[in-house]
Image (cartoon, rainbow, N blue to C red):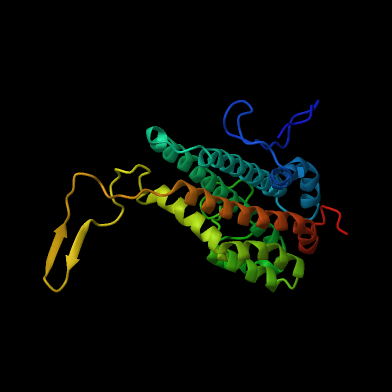
């Protein structure tokens, strides 16, 4: 996606490939729509100074909105990285399979597909932190502190574990309950896209693959790989254990096409949720008592 010439610093950018040069897939109209979600989230960061003035005038800690909108901009960039890596994975998927290059295709294609998933999960974590901080601004959302082990509004730019939430069903449940407790429909509406996301099969599959690659046994991508299940067969009646030994491995590696399809579904679910959260943010901030953006 080309960028127009600008005399000032670039505040938002979406790339179509993680490789140097223009070697990725051609951009389609659908790609441009997807890219705009990343772009729009990044553009939120460009308004942090104006938001800071509003926030401080409403009694929020100095730096609260710089932190909040910085997280939003970061979420946008991470979504853009997931977008680019997914497109690269699709290039590998569409590459003709030949015996001599099959392992290269499977290893590289799966790697960038899973990289897309890693960036998508990271973007999701950033978004839930943005949403939680917006909801917590409202005084009637203070009950969230007990659930999240907070001691009030999270300190700006706190790098501690408690201040940085993970996107998961339990955390979203707590934030949604707190939003509803305020009596402000716009705050509950802000959280609901994330509630739908974490309950979706597409997101659950993407997160599960990320978990396997991050801190569990990640199956190998080659045909001669080691099984990811116990190779011993148990015969309870005979009370025996059997291990079959053969010259060639019967291991079946993950199928690249299936991994890319799974990644694409997870990305689309996240992108849709982020689009809805972005569009609902102005009204939610107004409901929280900090009307930064104009609303209809």
Q: Quadrant of residue 291?
A: bottom right
From the top left corner, tell me how far across and down residue 174 is, in percent.
59, 68
From the top left corner, tell me how far across and down residue 108 is, in percent.
45, 37
- Residue at the spot 48% in from the left edge and 40% down from the top edge: 109
Compared across the picture, whether 189 is left or right of 197 comes to right
Q: Is residue 35 above or below residue 19?
A: below
Locate the C terminus and report the quarter of the image it occupies.
Answer: bottom right
Residue in the foreground of this view, choosing between 131 and 51 = 131
Residue in the foreground of this view, choosing between 270 and 293 = 270
Compared across the picture, whether 236 is left or right of 87 comes to left
Residue in the foreground of this view, choosing between 238 and 135 = 238
- Residue at the spot 45% in from the left edge and 38% down from the top edge: 97
Residue in the foreground of this view, choosing between 191 and 163 = 191
Asked if residue 168 can be seen in this view, the reply is no
Q: Is residue 163 above or below residue 80?
A: below
- Residue at the spot 38% in from the left edge and 36% down from the top edge: 99
């Amino acid at each position: 996606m080309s960028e127009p010439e600008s005399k000032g610093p670039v505040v938002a950018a979406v790339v179509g490939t993680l490789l140097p040069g223009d070697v990725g897939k051609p951009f389609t109209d659908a790609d441009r729509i997807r890219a705009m979600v990343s772009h729009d989230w990044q553009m939120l960061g460009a308004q942090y100074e104006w938001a800071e003035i509003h926030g401080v005038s409403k009694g929020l800690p100095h730096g609260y909105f710089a932190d909040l909108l910085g997280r939003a901009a970061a979420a946008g960039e991470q979504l853009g990285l997931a977008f680019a890596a997914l497109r690269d994975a699709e290039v590998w998927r569409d590459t003709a399979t030949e015996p001599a290059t099959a392992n290269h295709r499977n290893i590289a294609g799966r790697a960038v597909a899973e990289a897309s998933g890693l960036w998508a999960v990271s973007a999701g974590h950033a978004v839930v932190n943005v949403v939680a901080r917006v909801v917590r601004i409202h005084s009637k959302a203070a009950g969230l502190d007990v659930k999240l082990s907070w001691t009030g509004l999270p300190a700006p730019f706190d790098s501690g574990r408690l201040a940085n939430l993970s996107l998961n069903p339990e955390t979203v449940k707590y934030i949604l309950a707190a939003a509803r407790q305020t009596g402000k429909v716009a705050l509950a509406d802000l959280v609901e896209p994330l509630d739908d996301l974490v309950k979706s099969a597409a997101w659950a599959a993407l997160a599960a693959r990320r978990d396997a690659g991050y801190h569990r046994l990640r199956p190998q991508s080659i045909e001669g790989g080691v099984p990811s299940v116990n190779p011993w067969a148990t015969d309870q009646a005979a009370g025996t254990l059997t291990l079959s030994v053969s010259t060639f491995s019967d291991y079946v590696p993950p199928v690249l096409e299936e991994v890319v399809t799974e990644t694409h579904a997870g990305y689309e679910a996240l992108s849709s949720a982020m689009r809805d959260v972005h569009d609902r943010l102005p009204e939610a901030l107004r409901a929280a008592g900090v009307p930064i953006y104009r609303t209809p």
